[in-house]
Image: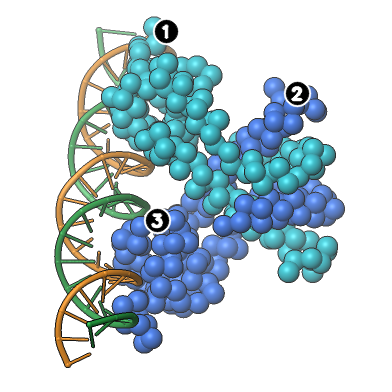
Chain colours: A blue, B cyan, C orange, D green
DNA sequence: CCTGAATATTTGACATCCTGAACCTTTCAT
DNA sequence: ATGAAAGGTTCAGGATGTCAAATATTCAGG
């Protein structure tokens, strides 16, 4: 149905791109959830764990990054903690804050998940290197423009 | 920071693109959830409602499209129904199936939501028409390659 | 030093989402 | 006519998310 190469207006073109992105989002979501479930993690747990790849982080910071209430993070970290994927330590600088850190097992889990997350890897193979580079640059411009 | 036009390997390029897409997905998700919440809908409810834009649909079909258990849809449709956004009617052809249809209010809600969903519309403005067309074509090829 | 405001986290109550198993109703093949 | 199969619902239970209230710690002023 969307075979006409040139839409009626630039606005229609934008809407078309937005719709395509929506499809992409749905696809990615499914694959991510699947990959997490394969390690008996939920999507939220996998996301938190992924955030800790670069080092420990206060609860508050996690909540801000995930755009949710801090009280929500408490539960997620609880479940990750009881399964040995993260630890909670009081920050010596400010004993109000708890630093959440991934354990060895936690690091391993995210690393594996990242590897098996072959989202779009196969379909991406349909694009040659030049096209992939073009795509990368376009996405980069979109994301830096959306600056969050 | 990522100004080198050609990463170390094609695999790295792919990973870069995948990471960018992950960022896009996060952004989209936030905006969608926000737009839905502005109409006191949840993301799941908005998605179901959006599915009914083209006409009534059996519960089972909704579940398949959303990749979830049918029993899940029951609850979501329940909530949409009590708020007057959808109706359930028995299919005359096969009285086992229930056809879910959006009401006037339901149609209006999705239409508005679709309009106010300005995801990437502003950042997309940074791309000229040629670039947007290129992006559209690349995304199309990715999605058809991922055949769902 | 003390008091009070502000911050980081937790707790509890509650709604939603999601799964899996058990159950009805209707259809369909034999 | 009977039994298997399919579409929905119900129920129990876990996870996610919000909000308000409570706790603990920090910090600024008097």
Note whether residue A74 is visible: yes
> Does label 2 or label 3 sit earlier along the sequence?
2
> Which residue in the protein does label 3 denote?
A68
Note whether residue A39 is visible: no
> At which x and y percent is residue D10?
21, 30
Check whether the beta carbons of the residues at disc 2 and disc 3 lie within 8 A of each other.
no
The subunit letter for the residue under badge 3 reads: A
- Quadrant placement of the N terminus of chain B: bottom right
Decide: is B124 above or below B8.
above
> At which x and y percent is residue A60?
39, 67
Q: Secondary structure at mark 2?
A: loop
> Which residue in the protein does label 1 denote?
B93
> Which residue in the protein does label 2 denote?
A8
Mark 2 residue crowding within 10 angstroms, few (<14) / some (14–19) / many (20+): few
In the rendered structure, the answer to whether residue A131 lies left or right of residue B84 reads right
Per the model, the C-alpha gap separating discs 2 and 1 is 39 Å
Q: Residue at x 75, y 66 (%)?
A: B2
Q: Secondary structure at mark 1?
A: loop
């Amino acid at each position: 149905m969307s075979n006409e190469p040139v839409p009626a207006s630039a606005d229609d073109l934008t809407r078309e791109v937005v719709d395509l992105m929506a499809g992409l989002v749905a696809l990615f979501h499914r694959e991510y959830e699947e990959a997490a479930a394969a390690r008996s993690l939920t999507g939220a747990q996998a996301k938190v764990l992924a955030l800790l790849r670069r080092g420990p982080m206060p609860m508050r910071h996690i909540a801000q990054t995930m755009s949710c209430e801090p009280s929500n993070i408490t539960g997620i970290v609880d479940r990750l903690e009881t399964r040995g994927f993260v630890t909670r330590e009081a920050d010596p600088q400010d004993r109000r804050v708890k630093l959440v850190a991934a354990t060895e097992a936690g690091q391993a889990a995210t690393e594996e998940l990242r590897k098996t997350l072959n989202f779009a890897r196969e379909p991406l193979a349909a694009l040659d290197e030049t096209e992939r580079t073009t795509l990368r640059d376009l996405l980069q411009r979109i994301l830096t423009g959306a600056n969050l």
